[in-house]
Image (spheres, rainbow, N blue to C red):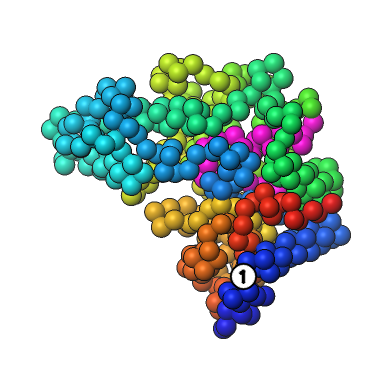
Amino acid sequence: MARAFFREFSMDDAGLDERRAAVAAFRDIADRISQDRESLAALRTVTFWGGAGFSKAWNPQSPTEGTLFSISRSEIETFKNLSHVLKALGWDENDGIGFEGFKTLGYVIDMQLKYPDIRNRYLDAQSLEMSIREIRTFIHNRFNALCDLSNIDPGSGKFPVPQVRSGNQQAIQNFFAELTGLCDGPVQDHGGLILNFVTTNYDFTIETILDTLGEADRPVFRRLYRGISPQRICGHSIWDQRRSVFDHNLIKLNGGFEMLRDGEGYHFDYRRRPLEAVRDNPPILILPSREQDYTDPYFKEIFPKAVRVLRDTRVLVIVGYSMPREDALVRFVLRQLAESGEDARGKYIFCIDLKGSDILDARLRWTFNSIDRMGWPRVHYYPGTFEDFCAEAQLG
């Protein structure tokens, strides 16, 4: 079936026309959601899948992969065990480690852990595990140095938002204010919008945005279901925090800077922590690798939740995520939106990214083979930034 059937404009007309078409389609869906609350067939479940471009839209200082996952020689030397592991592996760190080298290093360490018979004679499980903890510590500290993590205010329990917001932040905040306005109260009671977030990012961008829209006396982490129930949140028992009905789902597929080990469970700590505390208990993060390791119990819990969210989703908005080939397992999760043709019928994908739509189109068609056979899910490309999309949408 010709590609023109699925996209209103050919690639020759891409750009401004393509952007207008995507915005118009999203507005139409928002109108249908607001007008058709009671129907079981209503487009009520909207999921935002956030990649690096989502965080970049809110804060331009948010680092890219090439910046975040690069370690200089002097930085390596501050982590003594990691320095020992690299020397034992014969790694030449004179020029430091760039992003591609970082992915190779992650793969080598994982293989050394998985297969003791091929392990270097001067390495053991303990030294390898410690090196992973040191790398996670480094990533946390590097991110915080390049882009303030926006830890919560201990007194109010709220995420800080600048008194004077940038135009981009205002556009994004207005967009989500208008979108969450379609909820009109708890969705279980009013048949309104169900809003979900799935992200590959570690940071607190989504929490910060939603915190600006919620009730002043109820911090956002009390309103989000995270796929698992931590034992503590910001030092307090979950039983002092949780409620039986959550407003939204937030699932972090690659872990997050707030996710800490707490005995057999987890502690979600959004407070600022001293550097030594981070070294003692670094956050749970999936590190870039040629073959990423999702064997931690946390991921075994959240992946089924992510699958359930995607299968229930009617409208998927992919923001700043280019579906890289090394994310094979994450892309398999993404495919659960429409694993079969019948699953895909009646579903929509909006792909917002600065990368050319030809690249993303090929990757989406590889992920959802029903697009060519059935034309579902319907795909709309917006070749631009998320903040521009939000400014143009104006749902209110």
Near mark 1 (Cα within 10 A), the count class, few <14, some 14-19 or many ≥20, is: some
As helix, strand or loop, the secondary structure at mark 1 comes to: loop
Extreme residue toward the right, this view: 35
Name the residue: 30% across, 26% down: 74
Extreme residue toward the left, this view: 121
Q: Residue 9 appears in which quarter of the rendering?
A: bottom right
In-front residue for pair 169/264: 169
In the rendered view, would you say 216 is above or below 19?
above
Name the residue: 63% across, 41% down: 58
In-front residue for pair 384/351: 384
Magenta segment, which residues? Answer: 195-215
Report the side of 223 relative to 126 (left or right). right
Q: Is residue 25 magenta?
A: no
- Residue 389 image offset from top left, x and y in percent: 69, 55
Q: Is residue 214 magenta?
A: yes
Q: Which residue bears the numbered disc 1?
A: 14
- Residue 267 image offset from top left, x and y in percent: 54, 25
- Residue 82 image offset from top left, x and y in percent: 28, 28
Badge 1 amino acid: Ala
In the rendered view, would you say 306 is above or below 14?
above
Q: Is residue 368 visible?
A: no
Name the residue: 58% across, 21% down: 271
Q: Residue 230 appears in which quarter of the rendering?
A: top right
Q: Is residue 320 visible?
A: yes
In-front residue for pair 92/336: 92
